[in-house]
Image (cartoon, helix red, strand yellow):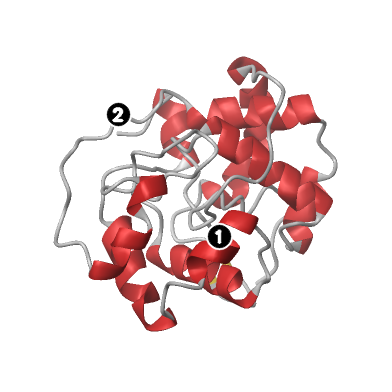
């Protein structure tokens, strides 16, 4: 399956973890609504998949705007390798990225404070930055993990582990996480209340 030429994998992710460098521009969500129309082609389609490797295109709705803008910048400069996303992000100005990020965040997610299920022991590595529920980030540079697709989170962790994704914070953290724990970590955070589809942002300006 070929990716459409759109903003398709802003991992914005989850575990697109860690700060990716500062986003300086203030975002205009109204302008971002127009610019982000192409995002819907993948991120607004239920169960849409990235091909080779195969994993769910991540939920972007409700994600921290600073994290999204920084992730787009990382795709643009090659810190995050993804051919389609590089082509899209590199065509955007810093202001464009900030505007898109502000729109996709919508109304900031308010953590429920309730944890669904029993956290696997390995989550202790994650809570300082992402919160016990995956929705209470230490700063807005870090991604919300709650509600992200489990297979996307697993792929992100694998990419950090292999060095394909380069981030000084995650490079240190991932060394302490065994790959056998990736599935349990991802499954736990995917079940928490948090991120949503861009369709929800388009319709309501916030996650349900």
* Coordinates of residue 113 in the picture (x, y in percent): 19, 37
| Element type at mark 1 | helix
Crowdedness near tag 2: few (<14), some (14–19) or many (≥20) residues, C-alpha within 10 Å? few
Q: Nearer the viewer, residue 143 or 105?
A: 143
The correct choice, above or below, for 17 with respect to 72 in the image is: below
Where residue 170 is drawn, which disc sits there?
A: 1
Viewed as shown, does residue 91 lie left or right of 80?
Answer: right
Dot in front, 2 or 1: 1
Viewed as shown, does residue 88 lie left or right of 205?
Answer: right
Residue in the image at 40% along x and 50% along y: 145
Residue in the image at 42% along x and 47% along y: 129
Per the model, the C-alpha gap separating discs 2 and 1 is: 25 Å
Q: Quadrant of the N terminus?
A: bottom right
Sooner in the amino-acid sequence: mark 2 or mark 1: 2
Viewed as shown, does residue 208 lie left or right of 85?
Answer: left
The correct choice, above or below, for 155 with respect to 69 in the image is: below
Residue in the image at 64% along x and 53% along y: 8
Crowdedness near tag 1: few (<14), some (14–19) or many (≥20) residues, C-alpha within 10 Å? some
**Residue farthest to the right, as pictured:** 91
Where residue 58 is drawn, which disc sits there?
A: none
The correct choice, above or below, for 75 with respect to 187 in the image is: above
Residue receiving disc 2: 110
* Coordinates of residue 175 in the picture (x, y in percent): 51, 73
Q: Nearer the viewer, residue 153 or 17?
A: 17
In this rendering, the count of numbered labels is 2
Q: Quadrant of the C terminus?
A: top left
The correct choice, above or below, for 1 with respect to 83 in the image is: below
* Coordinates of residue 134 in the picture (x, y in percent): 33, 48
């Amino acid at each position: 399956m070929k990716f459409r030429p759109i903003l398709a994998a802003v991992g914005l992710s989850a575990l697109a973890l860690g700060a990716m460098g500062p986003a300086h521009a203030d975002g205009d969500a109204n302008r971002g609504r127009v610019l982000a129309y192409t995002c819907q082609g993948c991120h607004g389609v239920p169960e849409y998949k990235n091909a080779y490797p195969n994993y769910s295109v991540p939920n972007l709705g409700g994600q921290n705007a600073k994290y999204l803008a920084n992730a787009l910048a990382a795709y643009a400069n090659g810190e995050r390798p993804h051919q389609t996303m590089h082509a899209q992000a590199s065509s955007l100005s810093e202001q464009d990225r900030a505007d898109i990020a502000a729109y996709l965040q919508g109304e900031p997610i308010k953590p429920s404070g309730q944890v669904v299920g029993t956290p696997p022991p390995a989550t202790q590595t994650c809570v300082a930055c992402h919160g016990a529920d995956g929705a209470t980030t230490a700063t807005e540079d870090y991604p919300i993990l709650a509600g992200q697709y489990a297979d996307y989170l697993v792929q992100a962790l694998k990419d950090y582990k292999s060095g394909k994704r380069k981030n000084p914070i995650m490079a240190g953290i991932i060394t302490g996480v065994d790959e056998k724990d990736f599935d349990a970590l991802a499954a736990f955070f995917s079940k928490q209340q948090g991120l949503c589809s861009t369709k929800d942002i388009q319709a309501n300006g916030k996650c349900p």
